[in-house]
Image (cartoon, rainbow, N blue to C red):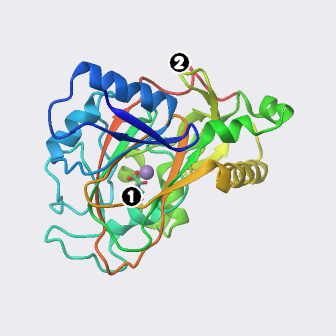
Amino acid sequence: MISVAPVKLDFVAEIGNIDLTKAISETQFSEIEAAFEKYAVLIFHDQPLSEDQQNSFANKFGPLGRPAAPFRPENTERLKRPESADISNVDERGDVLPEGDVRLLINRANALWHTDSTFKRVPAKMSMLCAQSVVPTGGETEFADMRAAWDALPEDRQKALDGLVAEHDYFHSRMKVGLDPRSVSPERRAMLPPVPQILVRTHPVTGRKSLYLASHIKRIYGMADAEAQKLVDQLMAHSTQPQFTYAHQWAVGDVVLWDNRCTMHRGRPHDPKLPRVMRRATAMDIGPSVQEGWKPAA
Ligand code: OGA
Ligand code: MN
Protein backbone atom coordinates (compact mmCIF):
# COMPACT_ATOMS: atom_id res chain seq x y z
CA MET A 1 0.00 0.00 0.00
CA ILE A 2 1.17 3.52 -0.74
CA SER A 3 1.11 5.92 2.20
CA VAL A 4 -1.01 9.06 1.99
CA ALA A 5 -0.24 11.86 4.43
CA PRO A 6 -2.50 14.92 4.18
CA VAL A 7 -0.56 18.18 4.02
CA LYS A 8 -3.50 20.56 3.65
CA LEU A 9 -7.10 19.47 4.37
CA ASP A 10 -8.54 17.56 1.43
CA PHE A 11 -6.31 19.42 -1.00
CA VAL A 12 -2.66 18.35 -0.80
CA ALA A 13 -1.14 15.01 0.23
CA GLU A 14 2.32 13.52 0.39
CA ILE A 15 2.57 10.05 -1.10
CA GLY A 16 5.13 7.54 0.16
CA ASN A 17 6.05 3.89 0.08
CA ILE A 18 6.42 3.81 -3.67
CA ASP A 19 9.34 3.98 -6.10
CA LEU A 20 8.25 5.72 -9.29
CA THR A 21 11.50 4.81 -11.04
CA LYS A 22 10.30 1.17 -11.01
CA ALA A 23 7.30 -0.26 -12.85
CA ILE A 24 4.11 0.64 -11.00
CA SER A 25 1.51 -2.10 -10.52
CA GLU A 26 -2.16 -1.61 -11.41
CA THR A 27 -3.01 -1.71 -7.72
CA GLN A 28 -0.45 0.94 -6.90
CA PHE A 29 -1.74 3.13 -9.69
CA SER A 30 -5.35 2.80 -8.52
CA GLU A 31 -4.22 3.87 -5.05
CA ILE A 32 -2.48 6.91 -6.51
CA GLU A 33 -5.50 7.68 -8.68
CA ALA A 34 -7.83 7.48 -5.68
CA ALA A 35 -5.59 9.94 -3.82
CA PHE A 36 -5.49 12.17 -6.92
CA GLU A 37 -9.30 12.31 -7.03
CA LYS A 38 -9.68 12.93 -3.30
CA TYR A 39 -6.88 15.44 -2.99
CA ALA A 40 -5.93 17.50 -6.00
CA VAL A 41 -2.20 17.92 -5.47
CA LEU A 42 0.10 14.98 -4.76
CA ILE A 43 3.72 15.27 -3.64
CA PHE A 44 6.32 12.51 -4.00
CA HIS A 45 9.85 12.94 -2.64
CA ASP A 46 13.15 11.45 -3.84
CA GLN A 47 11.92 10.28 -7.23
CA PRO A 48 14.67 11.18 -9.72
CA LEU A 49 12.67 10.20 -12.80
CA SER A 50 14.17 10.09 -16.27
CA GLU A 51 12.25 11.84 -19.01
CA ASP A 52 10.84 8.52 -20.24
CA GLN A 53 9.90 7.35 -16.75
CA GLN A 54 8.09 10.62 -16.09
CA ASN A 55 6.21 10.50 -19.38
CA SER A 56 5.15 6.91 -18.95
CA PHE A 57 3.89 7.58 -15.39
CA ALA A 58 1.98 10.66 -16.63
CA ASN A 59 0.58 8.65 -19.52
CA LYS A 60 -1.30 6.45 -17.04
CA PHE A 61 -3.56 9.44 -16.35
CA GLY A 62 -4.41 9.97 -20.01
CA PRO A 63 -2.94 10.74 -23.43
CA LEU A 64 0.02 13.09 -23.19
CA GLY A 65 -0.39 16.66 -24.43
CA ARG A 66 2.35 18.53 -26.26
CA PRO A 67 3.47 21.88 -24.89
CA ALA A 68 2.51 24.91 -26.94
CA ALA A 69 5.83 26.62 -27.58
CA PRO A 70 5.34 29.01 -30.50
CA PHE A 71 8.21 31.23 -29.35
CA ARG A 72 10.94 28.68 -28.78
CA PRO A 73 13.73 29.31 -31.30
CA GLU A 74 14.48 26.32 -33.52
CA ASN A 75 17.07 23.79 -32.36
CA THR A 76 17.09 24.93 -28.75
CA GLU A 77 15.24 21.90 -27.36
CA ARG A 78 16.85 20.51 -24.21
CA LEU A 79 14.45 17.59 -23.96
CA LYS A 80 14.12 14.50 -26.07
CA ARG A 81 10.38 14.04 -26.49
CA PRO A 82 7.94 16.57 -27.99
CA GLU A 83 5.54 15.75 -25.12
CA SER A 84 7.99 17.00 -22.47
CA ALA A 85 7.75 20.63 -21.41
CA ASP A 86 10.94 22.41 -20.49
CA ILE A 87 10.04 24.56 -17.49
CA SER A 88 13.43 26.06 -16.84
CA ASN A 89 15.50 29.20 -17.18
CA VAL A 90 18.52 27.53 -18.81
CA ASP A 91 19.70 26.97 -22.37
CA GLU A 92 20.89 23.75 -24.09
CA ARG A 93 24.25 24.04 -22.31
CA GLY A 94 22.65 24.52 -18.92
CA ASP A 95 23.58 28.20 -18.73
CA VAL A 96 21.04 30.57 -17.21
CA LEU A 97 19.18 32.48 -19.93
CA PRO A 98 19.80 36.21 -20.05
CA GLU A 99 16.97 38.57 -19.11
CA GLY A 100 14.80 39.27 -22.13
CA ASP A 101 15.37 35.88 -23.78
CA VAL A 102 12.11 34.89 -25.48
CA ARG A 103 12.32 31.46 -23.82
CA LEU A 104 11.68 33.15 -20.47
CA LEU A 105 8.23 34.26 -21.61
CA ILE A 106 6.76 30.96 -20.45
CA ASN A 107 8.21 31.39 -16.96
CA ARG A 108 6.85 34.90 -16.73
CA ALA A 109 3.42 33.69 -17.83
CA ASN A 110 3.64 30.80 -15.35
CA ALA A 111 3.99 33.38 -12.57
CA LEU A 112 0.35 34.38 -13.17
CA TRP A 113 -2.38 32.21 -11.61
CA HIS A 114 -3.49 29.77 -14.28
CA THR A 115 -4.67 26.31 -15.18
CA ASP A 116 -2.67 24.39 -17.76
CA SER A 117 -3.64 24.39 -21.43
CA THR A 118 -7.09 25.94 -20.98
CA PHE A 119 -6.18 27.78 -24.19
CA LYS A 120 -6.64 24.47 -26.00
CA ARG A 121 -10.09 23.08 -26.75
CA VAL A 122 -9.16 19.91 -24.91
CA PRO A 123 -7.33 21.25 -21.87
CA ALA A 124 -4.96 19.51 -19.46
CA LYS A 125 -6.28 17.01 -16.95
CA MET A 126 -3.12 16.35 -14.97
CA SER A 127 0.26 18.08 -14.93
CA MET A 128 3.37 16.64 -13.31
CA LEU A 129 6.55 18.54 -12.53
CA CYS A 130 9.81 16.83 -11.72
CA ALA A 131 12.44 19.04 -10.03
CA GLN A 132 15.97 18.78 -11.38
CA SER A 133 17.59 21.99 -10.13
CA VAL A 134 16.05 24.09 -7.40
CA VAL A 135 16.76 27.50 -5.90
CA PRO A 136 17.46 27.93 -2.16
CA THR A 137 14.80 30.61 -1.67
CA GLY A 138 11.69 31.50 -3.66
CA GLY A 139 10.69 29.52 -6.74
CA GLU A 140 7.86 27.74 -4.96
CA THR A 141 4.86 26.52 -6.92
CA GLU A 142 1.64 27.71 -5.37
CA PHE A 143 -1.70 25.94 -5.80
CA ALA A 144 -5.30 27.06 -5.25
CA ASP A 145 -8.17 24.70 -4.45
CA MET A 146 -10.93 25.77 -6.81
CA ARG A 147 -13.46 23.36 -5.25
CA ALA A 148 -13.06 24.98 -1.85
CA ALA A 149 -13.20 28.41 -3.51
CA TRP A 150 -16.48 27.43 -5.18
CA ASP A 151 -17.95 25.96 -2.00
CA ALA A 152 -17.24 29.22 -0.17
CA LEU A 153 -19.25 31.35 -2.60
CA PRO A 154 -22.77 32.38 -1.55
CA GLU A 155 -25.51 30.41 -3.29
CA ASP A 156 -26.89 33.30 -5.33
CA ARG A 157 -23.41 34.00 -6.62
CA GLN A 158 -22.96 30.34 -7.56
CA LYS A 159 -26.26 30.44 -9.45
CA ALA A 160 -25.19 33.51 -11.41
CA LEU A 161 -21.88 31.92 -12.44
CA ASP A 162 -22.99 28.41 -13.28
CA GLY A 163 -23.39 28.06 -17.03
CA LEU A 164 -21.17 31.00 -18.05
CA VAL A 165 -18.55 30.35 -20.73
CA ALA A 166 -15.24 32.19 -20.97
CA GLU A 167 -12.90 32.66 -23.89
CA HIS A 168 -9.33 31.54 -23.15
CA ASP A 169 -6.46 32.80 -25.25
CA TYR A 170 -2.80 31.80 -25.05
CA PHE A 171 -1.68 35.19 -26.34
CA HIS A 172 -3.79 37.05 -23.81
CA SER A 173 -1.74 35.82 -20.85
CA ARG A 174 1.56 36.29 -22.75
CA MET A 175 0.64 39.90 -23.52
CA LYS A 176 0.07 40.50 -19.81
CA VAL A 177 3.73 39.64 -19.24
CA GLY A 178 5.10 41.81 -22.01
CA LEU A 179 4.62 40.00 -25.32
CA ASP A 180 4.31 42.63 -28.03
CA PRO A 181 1.17 41.78 -30.04
CA ARG A 182 2.84 43.20 -33.17
CA SER A 183 5.47 40.47 -32.88
CA VAL A 184 2.88 37.72 -33.31
CA SER A 185 2.61 36.66 -36.93
CA PRO A 186 -0.78 35.56 -38.29
CA GLU A 187 0.67 32.03 -38.68
CA ARG A 188 1.54 31.85 -34.97
CA ARG A 189 -1.79 33.39 -34.01
CA ALA A 190 -3.55 30.73 -36.09
CA MET A 191 -1.68 27.95 -34.26
CA LEU A 192 -3.52 28.77 -31.04
CA PRO A 193 -6.92 30.36 -31.71
CA PRO A 194 -9.01 31.42 -28.67
CA VAL A 195 -11.25 28.67 -27.28
CA PRO A 196 -14.34 28.49 -25.06
CA GLN A 197 -14.25 26.87 -21.59
CA ILE A 198 -17.02 26.72 -19.03
CA LEU A 199 -16.47 28.85 -15.93
CA VAL A 200 -17.80 26.28 -13.48
CA ARG A 201 -16.75 22.67 -13.85
CA THR A 202 -18.13 19.54 -12.30
CA HIS A 203 -15.48 16.97 -11.49
CA PRO A 204 -16.30 13.81 -13.46
CA VAL A 205 -15.32 11.51 -10.59
CA THR A 206 -16.27 13.31 -7.38
CA GLY A 207 -19.14 15.42 -8.75
CA ARG A 208 -17.72 18.43 -6.90
CA LYS A 209 -18.03 21.78 -8.62
CA SER A 210 -15.15 24.18 -8.98
CA LEU A 211 -14.32 27.51 -10.55
CA TYR A 212 -12.40 27.11 -13.78
CA LEU A 213 -10.20 30.18 -14.06
CA ALA A 214 -6.89 31.06 -15.69
CA SER A 215 -4.86 34.09 -16.67
CA HIS A 216 -5.73 33.09 -20.23
CA ILE A 217 -9.35 34.31 -19.87
CA LYS A 218 -9.91 37.16 -22.26
CA ARG A 219 -13.65 37.60 -22.02
CA ILE A 220 -16.91 35.99 -20.99
CA TYR A 221 -19.48 35.37 -23.67
CA GLY A 222 -22.58 37.55 -23.37
CA MET A 223 -20.91 40.01 -21.00
CA ALA A 224 -19.34 43.42 -21.63
CA ASP A 225 -15.53 43.22 -21.52
CA ALA A 226 -15.10 45.57 -18.55
CA GLU A 227 -17.73 43.73 -16.53
CA ALA A 228 -16.18 40.34 -17.38
CA GLN A 229 -12.71 41.55 -16.44
CA LYS A 230 -13.99 42.82 -13.11
CA LEU A 231 -15.74 39.53 -12.43
CA VAL A 232 -12.67 37.45 -13.32
CA ASP A 233 -10.44 39.66 -11.16
CA GLN A 234 -12.83 39.30 -8.24
CA LEU A 235 -13.06 35.52 -8.60
CA MET A 236 -9.26 35.26 -8.90
CA ALA A 237 -8.82 37.30 -5.70
CA HIS A 238 -11.43 35.17 -3.93
CA SER A 239 -9.93 31.84 -5.02
CA THR A 240 -6.35 32.65 -4.09
CA GLN A 241 -6.94 33.60 -0.48
CA PRO A 242 -4.60 31.84 1.95
CA GLN A 243 -7.26 29.40 3.18
CA PHE A 244 -7.49 27.94 -0.34
CA THR A 245 -3.80 27.89 -1.27
CA TYR A 246 -0.68 25.88 -0.65
CA ALA A 247 2.93 26.69 -1.69
CA HIS A 248 5.26 23.81 -2.47
CA GLN A 249 8.92 24.35 -1.61
CA TRP A 250 10.96 22.25 -4.03
CA ALA A 251 13.77 19.79 -3.39
CA VAL A 252 15.64 18.00 -6.17
CA GLY A 253 13.83 14.76 -7.00
CA ASP A 254 10.40 16.02 -5.94
CA VAL A 255 7.59 15.01 -8.23
CA VAL A 256 4.39 17.01 -7.81
CA LEU A 257 1.27 16.35 -9.81
CA TRP A 258 -2.02 18.21 -9.81
CA ASP A 259 -5.55 18.02 -11.12
CA ASN A 260 -6.07 20.91 -13.55
CA ARG A 261 -9.81 20.29 -13.47
CA CYS A 262 -10.10 21.75 -9.99
CA THR A 263 -6.95 23.73 -9.17
CA MET A 264 -5.00 26.76 -10.32
CA HIS A 265 -1.29 27.29 -9.82
CA ARG A 266 1.55 29.74 -10.35
CA GLY A 267 5.32 29.83 -10.02
CA ARG A 268 6.77 32.19 -7.40
CA PRO A 269 9.66 34.54 -8.17
CA HIS A 270 13.28 33.75 -7.44
CA ASP A 271 16.75 35.11 -8.17
CA PRO A 272 16.81 35.03 -12.01
CA LYS A 273 20.57 34.43 -12.00
CA LEU A 274 20.15 31.01 -10.41
CA PRO A 275 19.15 27.94 -12.45
CA ARG A 276 15.76 26.43 -11.73
CA VAL A 277 15.05 23.39 -13.85
CA MET A 278 11.75 21.53 -13.94
CA ARG A 279 10.41 19.07 -16.45
CA ARG A 280 6.69 18.77 -17.01
CA ALA A 281 4.53 16.02 -18.42
CA THR A 282 0.86 16.67 -19.06
CA ALA A 283 -2.07 14.31 -19.50
CA MET A 284 -4.96 15.73 -21.49
CA ASP A 285 -8.58 15.83 -20.45
CA ILE A 286 -11.12 13.50 -22.08
CA GLY A 287 -12.72 16.27 -24.15
CA PRO A 288 -13.63 19.96 -24.31
CA SER A 289 -15.24 21.46 -21.19
CA VAL A 290 -18.06 22.99 -23.25
CA GLN A 291 -20.73 20.74 -24.69
CA GLU A 292 -20.33 19.29 -28.14
CA GLY A 293 -21.41 21.84 -30.73
CA TRP A 294 -21.43 24.75 -28.29
CA LYS A 295 -21.63 28.12 -30.05
CA PRO A 296 -21.74 31.62 -28.57
CA ALA A 297 -25.22 33.17 -28.73
CA ALA A 298 -25.39 35.52 -31.70
C1 OGA B 1 3.82 24.64 -15.16
C2 OGA B 1 3.89 25.81 -14.26
C3 OGA B 1 5.07 26.78 -12.38
C4 OGA B 1 6.40 26.60 -11.74
O1 OGA B 1 4.83 23.94 -15.30
O2 OGA B 1 2.75 24.40 -15.72
O3 OGA B 1 3.01 26.62 -14.25
O4 OGA B 1 6.49 26.84 -10.53
N1 OGA B 1 4.97 25.87 -13.46
O5 OGA B 1 7.35 26.23 -12.43
MN1 MN C 1 1.27 25.79 -15.48
Label at residue 185: 1
**Quadrant where the N terminus is found in the figure:** top left
| Residues at discs 1 and 2 in contact (Cβ within 8 Å) | no
Q: Crowdedness of circle 1 by 10 Å Cα count: few (<14), some, many (20+)?
A: few
How far across and down, in percent of the image, does residue 93 sit?
13, 71
Between 33 and 1, which is closer to the camera in this rendering? 1
How far across and down, in percent of the image, does residue 160 sit?
81, 32
State the separation of the CA atoms marked 1 and 2: 30 Å
Name the side, left or right, on which 206 lies relative to 229.
left
The reply to whether residue 221 is in sight is no
Is tag 1's residue or tag 2's residue first in the polypeptide sequence? 1
How far across and down, in percent of the image, does residue 274 sit?
31, 78
* Residue occupying image coordinates x 24% and y 63%: 73
Is 158 above or below relative to 79? above
Is 285 above or below relative to 256? above
Name the side, left or right, on which 7 lies relative to 28.
right
Label at residue 266: none
The type of residue carrying mark 2 is Glu
Label 1 SS: loop
Q: Quadrant of residue 62?
A: top left
* Residue occupying image coordinates x 36% and y 39%: 15
Give the foreground label among 1 and 2: 2
The reply to whether residue 10 is in sight is yes
Label 2 SS: loop
Residue under numbered circle 2: 292
How far across and down, in percent of the image, does residue 212 sit?
60, 38
**Quadrant where the C terminus is found in the figure:** top right
Q: Quadrant of residue 102?
A: bottom left
The type of residue carrying mark 1 is Ser
Is 270 above or below relative to 166? below
Between 153 and 187, which is closer to the camera in this rendering? 153
